[in-house]
């Protein structure tokens, strides 16, 4: 098993996001700074890309915060997607989101992406709370966020994902 040593979250422009939402890998790769895979442009993530492309069209400043590509710098391959749902809100809250291509799961990529997002949040004075929402059946993700000190604070219904458990980490926890 290959454990990631160096990963980054590569932000995409509106055109790349729009192409991914449409499942157009060729157009997405013309706009992307890294080579994207067929899985990136597949149907499982198209709703996320559509939501984020519309978000960037409406609020260009959100582009620096939203979902990007989890890139394995050593292997030079796209292994997933990760980012925040947007910039900090009025309460200083950001929500993390991540998904790893099934071909690259169980290798530490979700953990590495979460660590990058937590580091960014810890170094941004606007961020006071980091939120993660996880399906109760997603034991791997639930265990991951709990390992980083996230505390369960409630539940919500998401029209796309169904029931989600809400976990939060305050800036005090993010800075330790």
Image: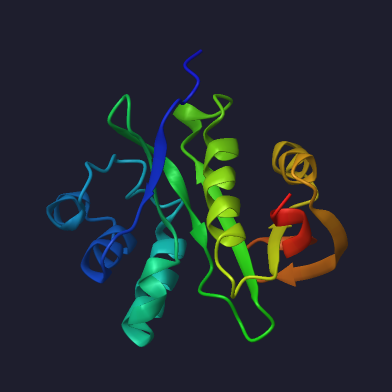
What is the x, y in percent for residue 141?
A: 70, 42
Location of residue 133 (image quadrant): bottom right
What is the x, y in percent for residue 98?
A: 54, 50
Instruction: Decide if residue 19 is on the left or right side of residue 83.
Output: left
Location of residue 171 (image quadrant): bottom right
* Number of numbered discs overlaid on the protein picture: 0
Q: Vertical placement of 147 versus 22: above or below?
A: above
Name which residue lies at 23% across and 44% down: 34
Instruction: Decide if residue 65 is on the left or right side of residue 169.
Output: left
Q: Vertical placement of 142 versus 109: above or below?
A: below
* Foreground of the two, 68 or 149: 149
Name which residue lies at 61% across and 81% down: 89
Name which residue lies at 80% across and 48% down: 149
Location of residue 14 (image quadrant): bottom left
Q: Residue furthest left?
A: 30
* Foreground of the two, 175 or 76: 175
Name which residue lies at 36% across and 41% down: 39
Q: Residue furthest top?
A: 1
Please say whether residue 95 is visible from this viewpoint: yes
Please say whether residue 50 is visible from this viewpoint: no
Q: Vertical placement of 161 versus 127: above or below?
A: above
Instruction: Decide if residue 6 is on the left or right side of residue 102.
Output: left
What is the x, y in percent for residue 151?
A: 85, 55
What is the x, y in percent for residue 29?
A: 18, 50
Scheme of colours in the image: rainbow
* Foreground of the two, 151 or 173: 173
Instruction: Decide if residue 97 is on the left or right side of residue 66.
Output: right
């Amino acid at each position: 098993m290959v454990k990631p040593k160096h990963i980054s979250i590569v932000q995409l422009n509106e055109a790349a996001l729009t192409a991914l939402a449409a499942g157009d890998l060729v157009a997405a790769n013309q706009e992307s700074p890294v080579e994207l895979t067929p899985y990136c442009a597949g149907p499982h993530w198209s709703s996320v890309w559509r939501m984020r492309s519309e978000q960037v069209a409406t609020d260009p400043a959100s582009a620096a915060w939203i979902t990007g590509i989890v890139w394995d710098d050593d292997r030079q391959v796209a292994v997933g997607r990760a980012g925040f749902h947007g910039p900090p809100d009025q309460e200083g809250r950001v929500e993390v989101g991540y998904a790893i291509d099934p071909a690259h799961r169980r290798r530490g990529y979700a953990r590495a992406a979460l660590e990058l997002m937590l580091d960014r949040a810890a170094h941004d004075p606007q961020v006071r709370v980091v939120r993660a929402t996880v399906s109760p059946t997603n034991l791997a993700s639930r265990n991951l966020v709990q390992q980083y000190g996230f505390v369960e604070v409630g539940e919500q219904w998401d029209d796309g994902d169904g029931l989600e458990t809400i976990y939060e980490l305050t800036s005090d926890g993010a800075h330790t």
